[in-house]
Image: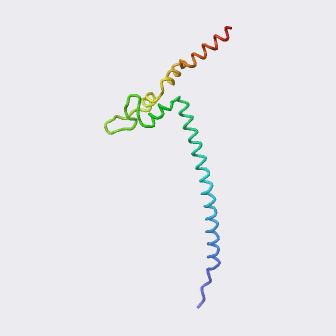
Amino acid sequence: MARKKSNRASLEQHKKAFRQNQAAIAKALAQNAELEKAITEEENLEIVGIIRKYRVGIDNLEQIMQGVRPTGESLFFEEKQKPVSPEEEAELLTPKKAKENQAGKLPKPAQELEKEESEHEQE
């Protein structure tokens, strides 16, 4: 009877490949941890940018996050509520100053600054 060839070489080759894979996985996990921090930071900057774009104040933001519309209704659907269209929701969530700016009006502080600038130009 012929003796079966040893599989020691194959075993060592598989162990080596396994260790290489573990090293690659550890490296990828470390890179993902760094990327996760960067992604969180970038998402936070995006959120701040959105909030500032719509000129939502701290008080309004707190109400929005608590799910309260200016009318006092919940932002989140309840079984009894009919779904609100994105346009209706945007209208309800848009602060008054932003609505005035969209209508072409300047907010009161900007009007005062403009008035002061014109007074200085006349002098």
Left or right of 93? Residue 13 is right
Residue 18, picture quadrant:
bottom right
Q: Nearer the viewer, residue 6 or 75?
A: 75
Which part of the image, by quadrant, shows the C terminus?
A: top right
Q: Is residue 22 above or below residue 100?
A: below
Q: Is residue 90 above or below residue 18?
A: above
State the image coordinates of residue 19 (x, y, percent, origin top left): 63, 68
Pick whichever, 16 or 105, lies toward us: 105
Count of all numbered marks drawn on residues in the image: 0
Residue most extreme to the top = 122
> Looking at the rendering, which quadrant does residue 4 occupy?
bottom right
Which corner quadrant of the image does residue 42 belong to?
Answer: top right
Could you say where residue 1 lies in the image, as x and y percent from the top left? 58, 91
Image position, residue 58 (x, y; %)? 50, 32
Residue at 57% x, 34% y is 49
Q: Residue furthest left?
A: 80
Where does the image place residue 83, in percent across and percent down from the top left?
Answer: 37, 35
Give the residue at x 53% y 33%: 51
Residue 63 in the image: above or below residue 106 = below
- Drawn side of residue 71 relative to residue 32, left or right: left
Residue shown at 31%/37% (left/top)?
80
Q: How is the image coloured?
A: rainbow
The residue under the point 43% across, 28% down is 92
Depicted 36 relative to depicted 18: above or below: above
Q: Pick the residue in front: 70 or 88.
A: 70
The residue closer to the viewer here, 10 or 62, is 62
